[in-house]
Structure formats: structure tokens, C-alpha cells
Amino acid sequence: MILQTDGAIELRRQTMQVELDSTRSGAERNRLGQFATPPGLAQDIVRCLAALLPGDAFPVLLADPSVGSGSFFSAALSVFGRENIAGATGIEIDNAFCQAAHKLWAPAGLTIVCGDFTRIISGPDCPAAPNVILANPPYVRHHHIDRQEKQRLQSLIFQRLNVRVSGLAGLYVYFLLLAASWMQDGGYAAWLVPSEFMDVNYGMALKNFLAHSLTLLRVHRFDPRDSQFDDAMVSSAVLIFKKIPPAAGHSVIFTLGGSLERPALTQTISQNSLLNSEKWTAYPQPPGNKRIAHGGSAVTTLGDLFKITRGIATGGNKFFVLERREAHKRGIPDQFLRPILPSPRQLQSAVVEAQDDGYPRLSRQWCLLNCNVSEALIESRYPALWAYLSSAESIEIKQGYLVGKRTPWYAQERRDAAPFLCTYMGRGNDEKRPFRFIWNQSQAIATNLYLMLYPRRRMAALLRQHPELAAEVFKILSGISGQELRSHGRVYGDGLYKIEPKELARTSGDAFIQQWPELAAGVEQQTSLPGLF
Ligand SMILES: C[S@@+](CC[C@H](N)C(=O)[O-])C[C@H]1O[C@@H](n2cnc3c(N)ncnc32)[C@H](O)[C@@H]1O
């Protein structure tokens, strides 16, 4: 029998990985969080950990709680060398991956345990506690974990660590906490995880556990525009820690961008200051970057997430925008009327609900006269509309610049309704926002007294798949501070602010990325993505 080198086995592993991935649909892979660590990244992570391991950690007792085809074990073989690995366990839920990993790596000393890591480590056959963990846990969003399963995981973690995990946390949060409870005291771990937990409320339990109960050695965040995976939409971070409470005055190295070995930015942060810190993505802080200082790298803007345009210029709102009652009284046929929002001054509510016919549920409804039919046809077939159009002569509507350029002069620009709008001008100092965001659930379009926000590709896909998230999108938009809006808008002498589409587009969209890392601008450029989550 010809003995294969570890390098040759790694090449076979990569082929098997591609084959296994191709036999599963995007939805299946999402359900189990099956996105393998690219080989180069696995090597970087293990090298980075190896540089921090003291001599007495060797020979290591390794574990990977979600081993897949064994990319980390392979990297460990090449970085540590076989002789420095006393034993290794890989746990995996998917039978096909278990078989592949067993076939590839059992001769090199990897023991595969097939099953659910979260059950195995709390069951009677729990493997020996490792002193080194290498992990890229399944990134399964909370929507895909059913209620009973969440409760089981939450109570397991509460029993083992006295930590309460939010029901909004993804599976990787449970994995990391359970694995930390399992590993040897004084052991080391390197985790490749989505970076979203760093800024969101549901990441608080994990952050406080990391900051309070472990000694964090390194936190590296990849540039969100530079996805680590060809096939998953996450922005990632590597966490390296030692399972021992932090010494007084301990500091953590936070790095961002570039590679683990050569990060673009580095900052040392006292571990104590991380406790209850809301935004870990505020670190490392580039010199003089205001946005980072208030928490977020602002690499994504509203313009990346929404196509922003002014509402339509009608050429004379007084003539072309009528109260619906009035239009009916005049006998103008419904087919020439489109719902339109009232002016911001007349719109009290920030949420515009819809009636069955698509009109806003408002006591006074407005419509836009919207007709492309020739004058001759209108005159012969629609006398009421003809009478109304004829009245334009007396009020000099037809002399207007815009109307003069149009054929026919009463035709309006075609527009879809936008789910979100922002008022175009307003006043406001200090905390008061000069502009208001509107959540438009109706089919009403808007005049140029508003900016219309049309979700772009990834944001549109998110809302298509999860329409219920529109409320959260609206909440984030409404949470943009008055100060930020003013800084992008322009002020007129009397304290009136206006904001043009390009200016609103420059506003930070980081809060969206913190909530849904999949929306990150760089990741958006990918073309063949498995489903959104
Ligand atoms: C993100 S992949 C990482 C695979 C491998 N460690 C790597 O880095 O390439 C996560 C793996 O976890 C597995 N998995 C999902 N849920 C699991 C569970 N409850 N217990 C064990 N493995 C699980 C998936 O099948 C998948 O192979």
C-alpha cells in the first residue's frame, strides 16, 4: 500500500469538499451551516494560534466541534506536525461528511464522532476534554432553530455556564459557549465566527462571557467587503482565547482587515473595557476616523443598500395632485388616478398602512392624475377628464418648464411605490431630526417633497424572503441620528435643512450590516449565492 502524505490527502479533501457541497442545495447547506473554511484561511488561523501556544500545551489534544471534511485538522497537521498531536476528535452531524473525514484522516489520528455536538458533549459518551479547539461552527440563524431546540440549548448553557443566551442568537453562539464549557481549563481555542455578535444586543451574553470569563488574546475582523467564503454571505472574525479568567490589566489585540498575519489596523484594548461595551467593531480605531469613534467602520452606506431618488416632479402639484374625493366628484375615471402621499406637512403618521385597493389608509386620500392617452381620445371618450385638463389653460400650467417638455403635456413619470421614504426638507437641532423616515405599506408614490428608498438587490432579497423584517429596517432608518442626517444634508440661512438623494446615500448603513452581515457591500457583488440565510 502506498502511504499518502498529509499534503496529498489535503488535496483529496478539497476535491471531496467540492463534491459534497455540489450534492446539496443552497437551502440544505444553509440549514446546517455548511460553509467550509478555505484551506489558506484554516492554515492562517492555526499558525496564528500556534504562535500563542506555550511549550507545555504540546502535544495537543485537539477537537473540532463541527469538523466537516477536516480542514482544520489538516491545517493542524501541517502547522503542528503529527508528532505534536496527542489525539484529535472531530464531531460532525452530517453522515456524508463524517464518512469523508474518517476516510481521509483516521489514519492520521482523527477520531470522528458522528452526531450533534450540542448533545454529544452533554451526553454520557462525551469525548475527553481537549486543550486546543479549532472551530468554524455552523452559522445557522435563529429563524432556523425551532423554539424547543432554542430552549434546550439555552437551558444547557445556563446550567453549564450560568449565562443566558438571547433567543435571537445564531447557532454559533451556543456552539462557542458549549465548547468553552467543555474544554480543559487553561486550554486554547481559535474560532472563526460571524462578526455580527460584536455589535448586536443578542451578542451581549457572548461578549460578556468572552470579556469576563476567558482571556481573550486576539480578535481579528476581516474587512466586511472581503468575504472569506466564496459561497456564504457573512463577514467574519477570528477569536483566539485561553480558558482562564483574565488577569487584572490584561489587554486584547484587536485587528482589522488585511490578513491575520498582516492586519491593516491594530489596537490594544484593555479587556476590562470590553465588558458591557456595545460595539466591539469600534476596535481597532483608525486614527482620526470619526465614524469608527462612534462605533462602526461605515464601510457600507445607505446608497449601497437602497436606490435613492427624489419623488416625482409633477409639473404643478396643485393641478396634478387632487384629493381623491375631488377627482371622483369631477368624474375623472379611476384608471387615470394613482395613489400618491400627501405632502409631509399633512402626513402625521410615520407608518402609512394600506387599504385593499392600495391607497393609504388615511382620512384624506390623494391621487396623481396620470394619463398617457392622446388629447383627441380623451376629448371623445372621457369628457370629464377632458373638462379638467381644459381648465389648465386658465392657470398657466402648460407654460411650466417641465410640462412644456412632456408629450402629452399631462403625462407623468412612471414610478413604483417605494417601501421607505425620507422627507426632503425640514428643521431640527440637537437631537431633533430635520428629516423623517416613512414606512409606506401602500401603493402610493410620492412627489419630490420626499426621497424614495428602493431596496437594492440583497436588501430587496432579504425583504422578499422575510417581509416581517421591514419593521426592523424602518426602525434602523428611524434611528439615524439628527446629527448624522444634518451632517449629510445642507443647511439654508434660516435653519432649513434639505437632503438630496446623493447626500442621504452617503449616510452610514453600518447599523444594517451589524444586524444582517449578509448585506455587506463587498459580499453583495457575489453572483452565485445560495439563499440568503
Ligand atoms: C461552517 S462548517 C465548518 C466545517 C469545517 N470545520 C471547516 O472549517 O471547513 C460547519 C459544519 O458543522 C456541521 N454541523 C452543523 N450542525 C452541527 C451540529 N449540531 N453538530 C455537529 N456538527 C454540525 C455542518 O454539517 C458543517 O459541516
Image (tube, rainbow, N blue to C red):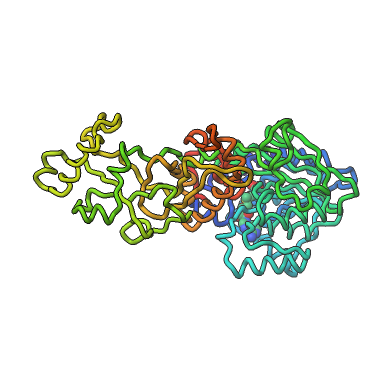
Residue 19: image location, x then y, percent: 53, 46
Seen at 36% across and 47% down, the residue is 445
| Residue extending farthest left | 380
Seen at 48% across and 40% down, the residue is 425
User: Which quarter is ligand 1 in?
Assistant: bottom right
Q: Quadrant of the N terminus?
A: top right
Q: Is residue 178 left or right of residue 298?
A: right
Seen at 80% across and 55% down, the residue is 130
Front position in the image: 458 or 4: 458
Q: Is residue 413 left or right of residue 61?
A: left
Seen at 43% across and 43% down, the residue is 450
The vertical placement of 180 against 292, above or below, is below
Residue 306 visible in the current orientation:
yes
Residue 517 visible in the current orientation:
no
Front position in the image: 393 or 36: 393
Residue 112: image location, x then y, percent: 69, 56
The vertical placement of 491 against 464, above or below, is above
Residue 380: image location, x then y, percent: 9, 45
Q: Is residue 414 left or right of residue 439?
A: left
Residue 259: image location, x then y, percent: 70, 34
How many circles with numbers are drawn on the protein?
0
Front position in the image: 106 or 303: 303
Q: Quadrant of residue 54?
A: top right
